[in-house]
Amino acid sequence: MDYSENSSNKVYLSGTVAAPPAYSHEIYGEGFYELHIAVERLSDQKDILPVTLSERLMEGRDFIQGSPIAVLGQFRSYNKISDGKSKLMLTVFVRELTEPDESQNPNSVELCGYVCKPPIYRMTPFKREISDLLLAVNRAYNKSDYIPCIAWGRNARFVKNVPVGAQISIKGRIQSREYQKKIDDERYETKIAYEVSVGRVESADASAEIAATAEE
């Protein structure tokens, strides 16, 4: 990935427009829009991922549903107040629109940050090892993005022993995942979670490295 403005948070996505842009917000007189990109997986499924881009980048371009799109940017988080509660929202903040490149992985993310909660290690009913972790990635103006990540197999075993405050680097892909949230005894609501599926992880403080291919 040839995108070096911030080496601690880099994203490349290439896919198709899943839904036309919708106005999101304005900062210092500049409007920002949100759209979703459909990115193919190796398993022939798709990840439908949210991206945010400024009106400046949209000038002279059409974002028709199904049309190809490729972006460079950063995976960011922000808090949104809903029903009096603060919810962590995730989006790919677009720095540059580029041409799709078939030689590149269409869904690539690189992060370097700090573990900010004890990792949660578990075993699925099919004996697959999983570790969930939350990574704090610093950016300009003393801000940080809090990115949920999920690791499998050897990566899960490595991650479960990483202490809070340790700095690690990961490479992987951004995935979307549906889940059911219980509203009451009889009702459930379908929600979508976004997270980084870890393909490679290493300590940023040592040369030791655990690497494996993340499963689809």
Image (cartoon, rainbow, N blue to C red):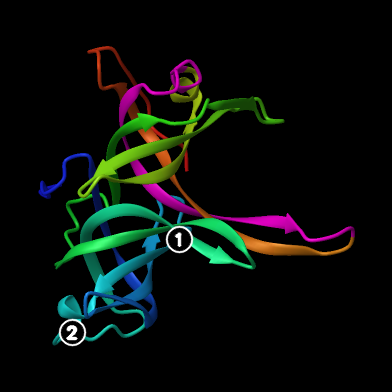
Instruction: Identify residue for label 2.
Output: 61
Mark 2 neighbour density, 10 Å: few (under 14) some (14–19) many (20 or more): few
Residue 192 falls in which quadrant of the image?
bottom right
Residue 129 falls in which quadrant of the image?
top right
Label 2: which secondary element? loop
Instruction: Identify residue for label 1.
Output: 46
Q: Residue at x 51, y 20 (%)?
A: 160
Q: Residue at x 54, y 57 (%)?
A: 87
Q: Residue at x 48, y 15 (%)?
A: 161
Amino acid type of the residue tagged 1 in the rendering:
Lys
Amino acid type of the residue tagged 2 in the rendering:
Arg
From which residue to which does the magenta span run? 158-185
Q: Nearer the viewer, residue 88 or 60?
A: 88
Estimate the x, y position of residue 18 in percent, counting from the top left: 40, 75
Estimate the x, y position of residue 121 in percent, counting from the top left: 58, 25
- Residue 23 drawn above or below residue 40: below
The label nearer to you, 2 versus 1, is 2
Estimate the x, y position of residue 113 in percent, counting from the top left: 31, 33
Q: Is residue 7 magenta?
A: no
Q: Is residue 177 magenta?
A: yes
Q: Is residue 178 left or right of residue 108?
A: right
